Image (tube, coloured by chain):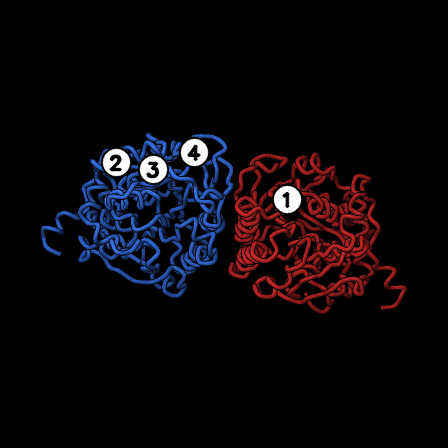
Chain colours: A red, B blue
Amino acid sequence: MSSKERRIVAFETHPSLSSFDFQQNAFKDRSVLITGGLGFIGANLAGRLAGLGAKATLVDSLIPEYGGNLWNVEPIRDQIRINIADVRDEHAMKYLIQGQDVLFNLAGQTSHLDSMVNPYPDLEINARAQLSILEASRKFNPKLKIVFASTRQVYGKPQYLPVDERHPLHPVDVNGVNKLAGEWYHIVYHDAYGLRTTVLRLTNTYGPRMRVKDARQTFLGIWIRRLIEGKPVLVFGDGKQVRDFNYVDDVVDALLLSASSDDSNGQIYNLGAEDPIALKDLAVLLVQLHGRGEHQLVPFPDDRKAIDIGDYYADYRRFRSQFGWRPMVDLQEGLKRTLEFYRQHAKHYWNSDES
Amino acid sequence: MSSKERRIVAFETHPSLSSFDFQQNAFKDRSVLITGGLGFIGANLAGRLAGLGAKATLVDSLIPEYGGNLWNVEPIRDQIRINIADVRDEHAMKYLIQGQDVLFNLAGQTSHLDSMVNPYPDLEINARAQLSILEASRKFNPKLKIVFASTRQVYGKPQYLPVDERHPLHPVDVNGVNKLAGEWYHIVYHDAYGLRTTVLRLTNTYGPRMRVKDARQTFLGIWIRRLIEGKPVLVFGDGKQVRDFNYVDDVVDALLLSASSDDSNGQIYNLGAEDPIALKDLAVLLVQLHGRGEHQLVPFPDDRKAIDIGDYYADYRRFRSQFGWRPMVDLQEGLKRTLEFYRQHAKHYWNSDES
């Protein structure tokens, strides 16, 4: 990589909340393990942690269908340690968690459709591997602080909006059930053994380094790819489904805040945004920000319709009031940065010969 | 077995609600599969189904630590088919569900403590095996009616009493998390694929044929064993924890009712009783009904305290209003029958040489 290219892909300086300043020291020289570290959120988190002087080890399986991508951490390659391993590898995980101060437990199977086509890998990764990570922590590193990335998917189709943490749990696909199990193992290991675990239920997260090759991580990924390739963005149904979106740097803030305090132990928090938007309007905004292209409304494919959740946006007041967190990057600004990133770095995220 | 003994252990005639009469034909000549069929609830259900003219196949792994016991079905051996297999055996289950009309999905790992000592068998049985049973049903018998036995354990420590189905889910042990996953797979396979699944969340179930050798299935089991052995019944803590209890024949009613109707598809229902009781009072009642013995309050063992849920009793109005079900056997009568059963048949349930 040339020094010019390196500069271009460097991790942005995030306009941190002033209340986050204590973090500057919270992670200095701390040993931090990130599962899914070469993936979208993991790599962005690693970039921030490198700047904060942490000693980060990134664990990733680099399974081609998942989010890991070595190029995601190119700018910080000499500031981190990379360990290729699968979270299902109990022995590797048992070794890797030892001596760590913090675990950001982000590795997961994220595709809802894949979880319905073949539910077992989803179960092994999102549920069983979590249990073995917690068992290892209980036995070999009981002081470890663990932040687990869960998902709004555990709520299913909202019964009211915005969705707070007391909303009934009603997952609509196998992925949602397994993530539910994964997060509750974390809570049980806090309640029964005193492990320092925190669960964040993420909503749609987007930004540089997300998987855009297909819709396995987020539909926004494939929208952006198609836009850049000059193809129409395909919006399912009438496009009136409302969703909320967090820019990845804001999610990184939330992960760091959760990890820096014991007040979050044994707790579950929603993340969310102030500016939910209908998917059709999001498509219009994206086309407008890109400066060209178009969107098309197309009928819902049957397999997706069966697991669609309709409108969703979160009430994240619980996390905001406890930690002062709020999203700093609005949707327009976040999408602008994201489009810019993929216009420059498309070749590292998809091969234009494959669909 | 002598004809005299056979008469003694015969399945009792249950004083059915008149509204249950339609069941007489609902199961005649129907092919019914019961996982955990040699266990406590499974064997009692099989006894009833045999009387209703169903063609029942009982699947059981006969794992010594679990509830299966061939002697449980001695009186109906020539009216049922027994297939020894583990629900984790995907291929066996895939074969066995084919051609069945109804599946009573009762097999489970029930010990909360075991699930904490070694969480993986609990995960494999209570979660993964459920997924593979549902996958098999989706692919090879999509019309199958499935009734899944879940547990009050998914609610954890009650936030209010009585606990209805809208109570937040907050399992306190690994068993509770895995049962939660198991029941939600059933709901997801209804919602996404139209499978005819129903979930019953059972509270403490007791009666003839329960495991009394130890506390792996219910603490009431070991209480009864100790009482009959002339040892004091040990009550943990102050004994003020309130619980509700269903006599097994009432639970069999509920299973049959759920299976006989498509109104229950995709639904979750609590079972429960009208007469919750503090454990200390239960111990007193049991001693009184037995005619001798005593109870002792002993401190909570640490491992049990960590996962104790305090007071619990269910609101079962949802199931009652939809199906007219209510418990027909009160606690005093049920305990009397249960004690009588184990006084007569102790030798089939524990070996007095082992503790």
Q: Which of marks 3 and 2 is nearer the N terminus?
A: 2
Residue B287's disc is: 2
Drawn side of residue B188 relative to residue A288, left or right: left
Circles 4, 2 touching at the beta carbon (< 8 Å): no
Q: Badge 4 is on which residue?
A: B311
User: Where residue A193 appears, x then y in whole percent?
Assistant: 54, 48
Toward the viewer: B286 or A235?
B286
User: Where residue B350 appears, x then y in whole percent?
Assistant: 26, 53
Circles 3, 2 touching at the beta carbon (< 8 Å): no
| Residue A29 position by quadrant | bottom right
Label 4 vs label 2, nearer the camera: 2
Circles 2, 1 touching at the beta carbon (< 8 Å): no
Same-chain status of marks 4 and 1: no
Drawn side of residue A161 relative to residue A252, left or right: left
SS of the residue under disc 2:
helix
Label 4 vs label 1, nearer the camera: 4
Toward the viewer: A177 or A181?
A181
Q: Of the residues shown, which amino acid type is indicated by label 4?
A: Asp
Same-chain status of marks 4 and 2: yes
Q: Earlier in the sequence, mark 4 or mark 2?
A: 2
Q: Badge 3 is on which residue?
A: B296
Q: Gap in Å between the C-alphas at discs 2 and 1?
A: 67 Å
SS of the residue under disc 1:
loop
Residue A238's disc is: 1
Circles 3, 1 touching at the beta carbon (< 8 Å): no
User: Where residue B191 appears, x then y in whole percent?
Assistant: 48, 47
Q: Quadrant of the C terminus of chain A?
A: bottom right
